[in-house]
Image (cartoon, coloured by chain):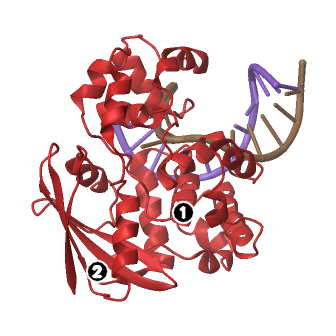
Chain colours: A red, B brown, C purple
DNA sequence: AACCAGGGAAGAT
DNA sequence: ATCTTCCATGGT
């Protein structure tokens, strides 16, 4: 067992990460201890990294610990990547000064992109969540993980694509997936296993290349592709305009009386580039 | 009881 | 290319 102390130079709201994590039923966390446990797979080996938040938004500090000495550096690096500890909010903050989002943005300083833990997990989660209310979506997530994933050190690991690729559509129908959703999840997993879709490689492509590649797959539209760029890769300039949460948040904040159209969203968000993702997080947060 | 939900495919124009 | 319609299922 090793422990590493981390101090960030940028502001960072770790409690927002904790709050978001409470929405996922299978995530191991301790609100009072400000601690989350993150599953990390390195070279097919399962590791659990404990992340304990200390300090404040202005002076964020962490103690992270895990058991594998050999994988220590890789685990520290991966956790920093997942939690976006390399992001410097200085230029992001400056960017929103004087924009139409300024007031809301600075009401929630240091809001990080809450990345998913794993590229495959993020993509499949996106498919499962399509058109479902959050509560039921998380219920489906939990059933899926409990049946086809595995537990290690009291932390749930997501199913592997190899496991899901071998399932029949009926297997997921039993968990109350719709027929379509079952097909999308299993067919996408099969493409990953047979090499037609390489998420690690895709992670290095441009935003536009990622979208072009993903929306060719049956079951993945623009919303799911953008969702993966944002929550899977942590890209900085995504504003899912078709997302009902974004629409509702803008309706309330700009006092529109109705949900804005895609075109209206584009007009109002012009000045947010290249940090639209941080605007998105702030908007979602504002209605949570 | 109707309408909504952090959509997408397939068909129609 | 852009617009409907249908798909499924739980939540409010």
Examine the rendering and report whether any part of residue A215 can be seen. Answer: yes
Residue at image point 46% right, 53% down: A137
Where is mark 1, residue-wise? A119
Q: Which of the 4 image quarters holds residue A251?
A: top left
* Circle 2 Cα neighbour tier, 10 Å, few/some/many (<14 / 14–19 / ≥20): few
A46 or A217, which is in the foreground?
A46
A226 or A148, which is in the foreground?
A226
**Residue A154: mark:** 2
Decide: marks 2, 1 in contact (CB < 8 A)?
Answer: no
The chain identifier of the residue carrying mark 2 reads A
Q: Nearer the viewer, mark 2 or mark 1?
A: 1
Mark 2 → mark 1, Cα distance in angstroms:
22 Å
Left or right, residue A260 beside residue A105: right
B12 or B1, which is in the foreground?
B12
Examine the rendering and report whether any part of residue A30 can be seen. Answer: no
If you read the primary sequence from the N terminus, does the residue marked by circle 2 or circle 1 appear first?
A: 1
What is the quadrant of the N terminus of chain A in the image?
Answer: bottom left
Q: Secondary structure at mark 1?
A: helix
Marks 2 and 1 belong to one chain: yes
Residue at image point 59% right, 21% down: A262
Q: Which of the 4 image quarters holds residue A99?
A: top left
């Amino acid at each position: 067992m090793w422990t590493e102390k981390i101090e960030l130079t940028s502001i960072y709201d770790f409690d927002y990460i904790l709050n978001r994590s409470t929405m996922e039923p299978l995530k191991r966390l301790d609100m009072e201890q400000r601690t989350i446990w993150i599953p990390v797979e390195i070279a097919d080996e399962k590791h659990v990294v404990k992340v304990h938040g200390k300090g404040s938004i202005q002076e964020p500090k962490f103690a992270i610990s895990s058991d594998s000495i050999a994988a220590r550096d890789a685990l520290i690096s991966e956790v920093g990547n997942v939690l976006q500890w390399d992001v410097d909010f200085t230029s992001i903050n400056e960017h929103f000064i004087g924009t139409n989002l300024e007031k809301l943005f600075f009401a929630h300083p240091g809001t990080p992109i809450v990345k998913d833990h794993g590229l495959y997990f993020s993509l499949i989660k996106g498919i499962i969540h399509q058109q479902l209310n959050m509560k039921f979506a998380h219920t489906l997530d939990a059933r899926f993980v409990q049946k086809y994933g595995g537990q290690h050190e009291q932390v749930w690991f997501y199913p592997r694509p190899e496991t899901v690729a071998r399932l029949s559509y009926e297997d997921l129908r039993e968990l109350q997936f719709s027929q379509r959703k079952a097909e999308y999840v299993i067919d996408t997993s099969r493409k990953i296993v047979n090499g037609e879709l390489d998420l690690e490689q895709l992670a290095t492509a441009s935003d536009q290349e990622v979208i072009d590649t993903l929306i060719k797959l049956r079951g993945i539209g623009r919303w799911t592709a953008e969702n993966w760029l944002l929550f899977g890769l942590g890209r900085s300039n995504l504003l899912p305009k078709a997302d009902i949460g974004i629409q509702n948040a803008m309706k309330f904040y700009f006092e529109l009386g109705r949900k804005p159209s895609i075109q209206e969203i584009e007009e109002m968000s012009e000045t947010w580039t290249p940090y639209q993702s941080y605007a998105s997080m702030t908007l979602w947060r504002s209605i949570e």
